[in-house]
């Protein structure tokens, strides 16, 4: 299932899940996650202006954090995915809503 994420709610936490794929093409970031039941979901994000990541393959997810802020009259959503093994950010990105 492919879901366009508009930043109006939180991305589910996916504890014990994994990042299966992360790709960025034509100004669209696609993030594919697999939960502990082996169910796979893909989220699409538009208007990305910041993206950073470390090795995320085979790392279990501890938590997915979603933050919102307003900068110069622009609404911004920030998403951080934390590793269950290290507690550090595996993936972080921001986009305009």
Image (tube, rainbow, N blue to C red):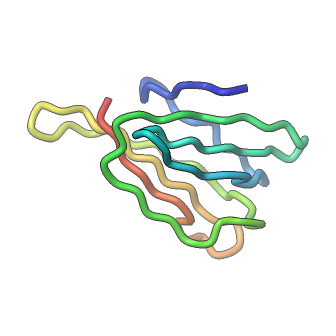
Instruction: Name the outermost residue toward the left.
Output: 72
Q: How many marks?
A: 0
Quarter of the figure that contains the C terminus: top left
Instruction: Name the outermost residue toward the bottom.
Output: 86
Residue 56 placed where, x, y %?
Answer: 65, 66
64 vs 96, left or right, is: right
Which residue is at a point 72% across and 66% down the rendered structure image?
57
Foreground of the two, 13 or 23: 23
- Snapshot quadrant of residue 75: top left
Quarter of the figure that contains the N terminus: top right
55 vs 48, left or right, is: right
Q: In the rendered view, would you say 29 is above or below 87?
A: above
26 vs 23, left or right, is: left
Which residue is at a point 44% across and 63% down the rendered structure image?
52
Residue 49 placed where, x, y %?
Answer: 30, 48
Foreground of the two, 68 or 39: 39
Which residue is at a point 67% across and 58% down the rendered structure image?
62
Which residue is at a point 29% across and 38% down the rendered structure image?
76
Residue 72 placed where, x, y %?
Answer: 9, 38
Q: In the rendered view, would you say 19 is above or below 5?
A: below
């Amino acid at each position: 299932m492919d879901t366009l994420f508009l930043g109006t709610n939180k991305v589910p936490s996916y504890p014990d899940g994994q990042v299966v794929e992360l790709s960025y093409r034509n100004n669209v970031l696609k993030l594919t996650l697999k939960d502990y039941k082996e169910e796979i979901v893909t989220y699409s994000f538009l208007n990305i202006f910041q993206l950073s990541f470390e090795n995320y393959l085979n790392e279990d997810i501890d938590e997915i954090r979603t933050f919102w802020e307003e900068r110069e009259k622009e609404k911004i959503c920030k998403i951080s995915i934390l590793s269950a093994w290290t507690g550090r950010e595996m993936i972080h990105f921001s986009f305009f809503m």
